Structures are given as structure tokens and as C-alpha cells.
Image: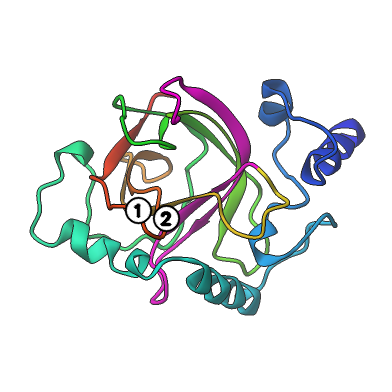
Amino acid sequence: MAAEASWAAAFACGIETPTTEHVMRSILLPCTLALASIVCGPAQAAGSEADHRFIEQLARMLPGDARTLHAEATAGQAIPECVGIPLDSLIPNYDGLTGAFLGAPQVVVDRPVSISFQLQPPMPDTVLAQGTFLGVFTSATGMPQTRVGTFTAVPDNPMVGTLLLLQTNLTTPEPEYVFAVLGLLKDLSGSRITGLCLQGPIRAGTPIHRPFGLYRTM
């Protein structure tokens, strides 16, 4: 555990490049909330007030259209890319996200074609879901790229809606990859998320593309 903790600190501070083995073995990175300017220090419990400040800061970072993506994407439109995933249900949490997901081939740059999530143990009083990810993404070169890093998933709220934030460079002040979560599907027991309907990546000055679905493979 000490060795993994020391690697996590080195990765979070940009000293060491992560490997697949590191990511799959390590759940908690000290700098998961880089977006909230928590830089290279011990992980601390985030209460509801801290969550609110984080979401407020996120709202200032995002382009204005991010706030209306949910309504625009689901207002009377069929979304065959997300077949079977309910789009009109509240998303209070992301319990059961840990696992591997696969989507259809993509032409939009910086979208995950396959991705694995590992939730970290929840902190007291926080509504944010955090952890690590490992995925294969589309790229501008046309060649798929493997990317690893941390994620923060934001549940329903009136300011920015439901979002999935992916970060591979923890020294940057803004989120690298922001996706609106239009809906999620759970298994019959309600214990595992089996499908995600995403929109993005959201960036200022870029067109809004069709949503895409990710479905659990394991």
C-alpha cells in the first residue's frame, strides 16, 4: 500500500508517467479534485458546502451551452445511439459505476470507444463520485489513443446538470474532457450501472455532436 501511495503522489504531481498496471491497482489519487484547485496534498473529505463551491467553479469554467445540453438533446428527439437507456430520470448518484464499458465506433475526436471506471470509496457528505479511469479514445490523428487519469461525476443539480469530467493532466486548472450525462441504465438489482448516454466532449466554440452510448461489458 505504501508503494502504491507513493506512486499515486508522484503521478498526481507530474513526476511519474502512469502505466496500465498502476491505474488498475490504484484507486485513490491524492489530486482527484484538481479542478477545484486541490493540488498535490492529502485527500480530504468534501462536505456539501465544498461540493457547492466545486459546482459553482465548474459552472464558471464551462461554456454556456453546457447548461442546456440535457434539454436540447432530449426534447422530443429520439436518441438511437442510447437505446434502452432512460433519459428522463434523475441521477442522484453514480453508485455501481465501477466496471468496463464499450461503445460504437466514433468519428468525433476525444470520445471513449471503451473505458473502465474504478470508483474510490465515497467521502463523507459528498455527492460527487470520484475515482480513476482507463480508456481507449478517438484522436485527431485517426489512431486510437489509450488515456488514463481521474474522473469526477456530478449528479443532478440546478447549476450544471449531470456531468462526467475526465482528467489526464492533473496540473491543468480546467477539465480536459467534459461530457453531459443524459441518462444511465442500471441492472435489475439497481446495484450496477449498465449503460451511460453521454454528450460531448463539451468545448467552447465547437459544434454539438450527437450523443453516444456506453454499455457494460464486465
Left or right of 83, for residue 9: right
- Quarter of the figure with the N terminus: top right
Instruction: Count up the numbered dots.
Output: 2
Looking at the rendered structure, the secondary structure element under dot 1 is loop
Residue lying at 10% horizontally and 48% vertically, measured from the top left: 78
Residue at 22% from the left image edge and 54% from the top image edge: 87
In the image, residue 134 lies in the stretch drawn in magenta: no
Q: Is residue 128 above or below residue 60?
A: above
Name the side, left or right, on which 192 lies relative to 168. left
Residue marked by disc 1: 206
Image position of 83 with respect to 172: above or below? above
Report the Cα–Cα distance between label 1 and label 2: 6 Å
Q: Quadrant of the C terminus?
A: top left
Q: Which residues are magenta?
A: 139-168
How many residues crowd around disc 1 within 10 Å: few (fewer than 14), some, or many (20 or more)?
few
Q: Is residue 33 left or right of residue 194?
A: right
| Amino acid, disc 2 | Arg
The residue nearer to you, when weighing 105 against 154, is 105
- For residue 203, the mark is 2
Q: Amino acid at mark 1?
A: Thr
Q: Are marks 1 and 2 in contact (CB under 8 Å)?
A: yes
19 relative position to 168: left or right:
right
